Amino acid sequence: MPTRARVLPVRRTTGGAIPPLQEPWRSLRETYLLFRRQRANLLVEFDLSFSEYLVLDLCAESPAKASEIAHAVGISPAGATDLIDRLEGRRLVARASHPVDRRAVLVRLTRAGRQLYRDAKSRERANLGRLTALMTDGERRALAVGLAALTRTLGGLGG
């Protein structure tokens, strides 16, 4: 049975409570770690790492270049090659020549990769639905507004 996430107490330092401007960042870090752990627990059923899932997600709509995969996952081109090799070894993706750029390789989902992705995505949607149902309408709106503002701000910083 799902339970409400615990509310984290304000950490105390020798100087007192964490200043208000630092608290959201600590909460964001804690949320990220909890979400990542939950995501990893969900994906273990499918024998997928989060990075592998991101590749399947990226390639689900259309084949992707290895360089696009590296960028989307946040890894080096060599790391993307290793990641694609692992997925290809499991017959979840296949490489193909790019029709225009002879230097580029396209990565596409195989039938098995598409089925595994659908199953994992379905479980992820159900899990996010349960998580969202535990929040009030106001909490969901505040989360959406806050994340949109953070995304916009970070996007404006570049890099």
Image (cartoon, helix red, strand yellow):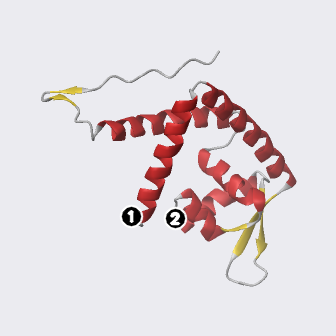
Check the image and report above or below for 113 versus 5: below
The image quarter in which residue 23 lies: top left
Choose top left, top right, bottom left or bottom right for residue 11. top left
Which amino acid is tagged 2? Ser
Q: Position of residue 40 (x, y in %)?
A: 59, 36
Q: Residue at x 69, y 37 (%)?
A: 124
Query: Which residue is depicted at the point 41% across and 34% down?
Result: 30
Say which of marks 1 and 2 sits in front.
1
Please say if 5 is above or below 106: above
Q: Position of residue 52 (x, y in %)?
A: 65, 50
Relative placement, left or right, of 50 versus 153 is right
Q: Amino acid at mark 1?
A: Leu
Whether the residues at callouts 1 and 2 have beta carbons within 8 Å, the answer is no
Q: How many marks?
A: 2
Q: Of helix, strand and loop, which one carries label 2?
A: loop
Answer with the quarter of the image where residue 119 lies: top right
Give me the disc on residue 157.
1
Eyeballing the image, is 15 above or below 101? above
Q: Looking at the figure, which quarter contains the C terminus?
A: bottom left
